[in-house]
């Protein structure tokens, strides 16, 4: 009966072991190459993973280049980080600046956040934030340290 089912016959054990070894080697190679790794997702996904873990410094380092290239979601998250003081000093003017940039690009959440943060700001602070935003945009983000 074992021979009818193909179990325990000679020669098949070697083939089975060879298949298992090859399969194991493929899994090791795919894992080592990063196919199954989250770190290969991209800067936005990696930034969000860091942000959600509370690792704000790596998050802002990943979001900043995206924000400078005009990514409104990254700009909005940076605005939130400045508003809450997450990984950066709390700063309403910088939050306003980043929310303004994102809102100009159509980010609805940034528009709502912009309205909210501006309620707690004096007119002079809003003017300062608008000047910061214009200077950053005009210099293609080379003249800003925010």
Image (cartoon, rainbow, N blue to C red):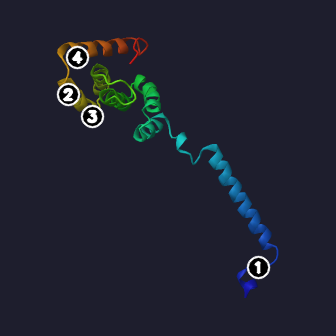
Q: Residue at x 31, y 30 (%)?
A: 84
Using the numbered discs, state the Cα–Cα distance from disc 1 to disc 2 in whole angstroms.
74 Å
Q: Residue at x 71, y 63 (%)?
A: 20
User: Which of the 4 quarters of the picture holds residue 118?
Assistant: top left
Q: Earlier in the sequence, mark 1 or mark 3?
A: 1
Which mark is drawn over residue 109?
A: 3
User: Residue 126: image x %, image y %?
Assistant: 22, 16
**Cβ atoms at labels 1 and 2 below 8 Å apart:** no
Q: Quadrant of the N terminus?
A: bottom right
Q: Earlier in the sequence, mark 3 or mark 2?
A: 3
According to the picture, the residue beneath numbered tag 2 turns out to be 115
User: Residue 10: image x %, image y %?
Assistant: 82, 77
Horizontally, residue 145 falls left or right of residue 11, namely: left
Q: Earlier in the sequence, mark 3 or mark 4?
A: 3
User: Residue 80: image x %, image y %?
Assistant: 32, 31
Using the numbered discs, state the Cα–Cα distance from disc 2 to disc 4 in whole angstroms.
11 Å
Q: Earlier in the sequence, mark 2 or mark 4?
A: 2
According to the picture, the residue beneath numbered tag 1 turns out to be 8
Under tag 4, what secondary structure? helix
The answer to whether 101 is drawn above or below residue 51 in the figure is above
* Label 3 environment density (alpha carbons within 10 Å; few <14, some 14–19, many ≥20): some
**Cβ atoms at labels 4 and 1 below 8 Å apart:** no
Farthest residue, direction bottom:
1
């Amino acid at each position: 009966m074992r021979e009818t089912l193909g179990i325990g016959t000679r020669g098949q054990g070697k083939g089975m072991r060879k298949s298992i070894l090859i399969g194991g080697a493929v899994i090791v190679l795919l894992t080592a190459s990063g196919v199954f790794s989250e770190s290969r997702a991209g800067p936005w996904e990696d930034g969000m993973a860091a942000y959600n873990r509370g690792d704000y410094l790596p998050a802002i380092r990943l979001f900043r280049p995206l924000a400078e290239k005009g990514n409104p979601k990254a700009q909005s998250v940076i605005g939130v980080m400045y508003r809450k003081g997450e990984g950066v000093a709390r700063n309403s003017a910088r939050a306003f600046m980043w929310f303004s940039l994102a809102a100009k690009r159509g980010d609805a959440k940034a528009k709502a956040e912009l309205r909210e943060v501006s309620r707690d700001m004096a007119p002079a602070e809003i003017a300062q934030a608008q000047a910061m935003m214009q200077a950053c945009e005009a210099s293609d983000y080379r003249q800003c340290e925010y």
